[in-house]
């Protein structure tokens, strides 16, 4: 038995350590009817419970197995294998069936769920879903307009390892999940490649523009250097010519 700590199942595990025969049967009955217990496999594995196999109480072991792994359709398929269900047991099994459905699909149509849970009207179905939400075994959104329940979370249920190929559905889900991951990774790789190519093209365009700007700057500098001496010489010549004329006028005045 694993260490469960303070869990709803713990009191029943403690009782079952010494319970045998009819007493063990009573523990099973109380456990499957308990409103806050939804995981039963630890109790099913208890030696005193397994000791009920091949006895007149064997149906109660099958009942506990049904609540551990099964659904309402499983019960309806072979009701003779189990003791008669009380109303509380039936309600609990409907909740567990809802959990199984929610783990298989994230969008549950009212019509299909009502059929599987044997619920006659939409109000009763919504009450069952709300009960499951308050119990913390599923989370989601009821859409009355579209008549669907959008699943956000569903409690995990145990897998019956005694059933042949019991892991096949889980393996199929994991395979699909891996395929989806591979598709997403391929898409991300393509996007990353496209982004890198776009970045390289942008860098090339930026470099070309910088080169063009540098070329224009160099051309302007050369032009300035070529024009600067001509302007300087012309100005100097004009000044010298002016000085010469003024000098001659002064001499002429003095001589005159």
Image (cartoon, rainbow, N blue to C red):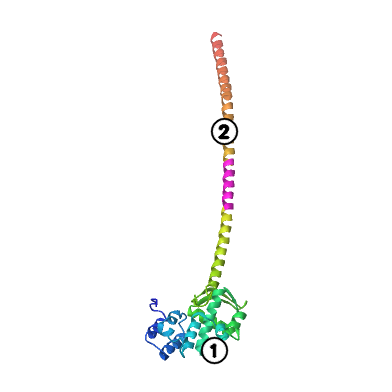
Q: What numbered label is drawn on residue 189?
A: none
Residue 140 image offset from top left, x and y in percent:
54, 75
Main SS, magenta residues:
helix
In which quarter of the view is residue 50 placed? Answer: bottom left
Q: Residue furthest top?
A: 255
Query: Does 189 sit above or below residue 2?
Result: above
Q: Quadrant of the N terminus?
A: bottom left
Label 2: which secondary element: helix
Q: Quadrant of the C terminus?
A: top right
Camera sees residue 130: no
Select label 2 or label 1 by which is in front: 1
Residue 253 image offset from top left, x and y in percent:
55, 11
Q: What residue is shown at x 57% (from left), y 47% (from top)?
A: 200
Q: CA distance from mark 2 to mark 1?
A: 99 Å
Left or right placement of residue 66 versus residue 9 in this view: right
Q: What residue is shown at x 56% (from left), y 13% (from top)?
A: 249
Query: Does 249 sit above or below residue 161?
Result: above
Label 1: which secondary element: helix
Earlier sequence position, callout 2 versus callout 1: 1
Query: Does 124 sit above or below residue 104?
Result: below
Q: Which residue is the site of mark 2?
A: 218
The residues colored magenta run 193-208
Residue 78 image offset from top left, x and y in percent:
56, 86
Q: Which residue is the site of mark 1?
A: 80
Q: Are marks 2 and 1 in contact (CB under 8 Å)?
A: no
Camera sees residue 244: yes
Q: How many marks?
A: 2
Out of 126 and 38, give the one closest to the viewer. 38
């Amino acid at each position: 038995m694993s260490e469960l700590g303070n869990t709803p199942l713990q009191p029943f595990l403690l009782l079952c350590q010494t319970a045998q025969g009819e007493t063990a049967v009573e523990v099973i009955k109380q456990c499957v009817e308990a409103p806050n217990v939804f995981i039963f496999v630890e109790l099913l594995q208890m030696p005193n419970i397994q000791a009920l196999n091949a006895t007149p109480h064997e149906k109660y072991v099958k009942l506990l197995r049904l609540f551990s792994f099964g659904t309402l359709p499983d019960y309806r398929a072979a009701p003779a294998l189990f003791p008669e269900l009380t109303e509380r047991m039936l309600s609990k099994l409907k909740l567990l069936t809802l959990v199984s459905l929610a783990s298989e699909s994230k969008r549950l149509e009212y019509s299909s769920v009502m059929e599987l849970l044997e619920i006659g009207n939409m109000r009763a179905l919504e009450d069952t879903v709300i009960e499951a939400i308050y119990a913390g075994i599923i989370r989601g959104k009821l859409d009355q307009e579209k008549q669907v329940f959008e699943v956000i979370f569903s409690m995990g249920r145990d897998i019956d390892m005694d059933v042949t190929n019991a892991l096949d559905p889980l393996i199929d889900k994991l395979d699909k999940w891996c395929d989806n991951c591979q598709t997403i990774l391929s898409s991300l790789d393509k996007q990353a490649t496209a982004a890198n190519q776009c970045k390289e093209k942008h860098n090339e365009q930026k470099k070309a523009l910088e080169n063009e700007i540098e070329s224009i700057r160099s051309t302007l500098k050369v032009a300035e250097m070529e024009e600067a001496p001509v302007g300087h010489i012309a100005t100097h010549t004009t000044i010298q010519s002016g000085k010469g004329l003024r000098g001659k006028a002064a001499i002429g005045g003095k001589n005159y």
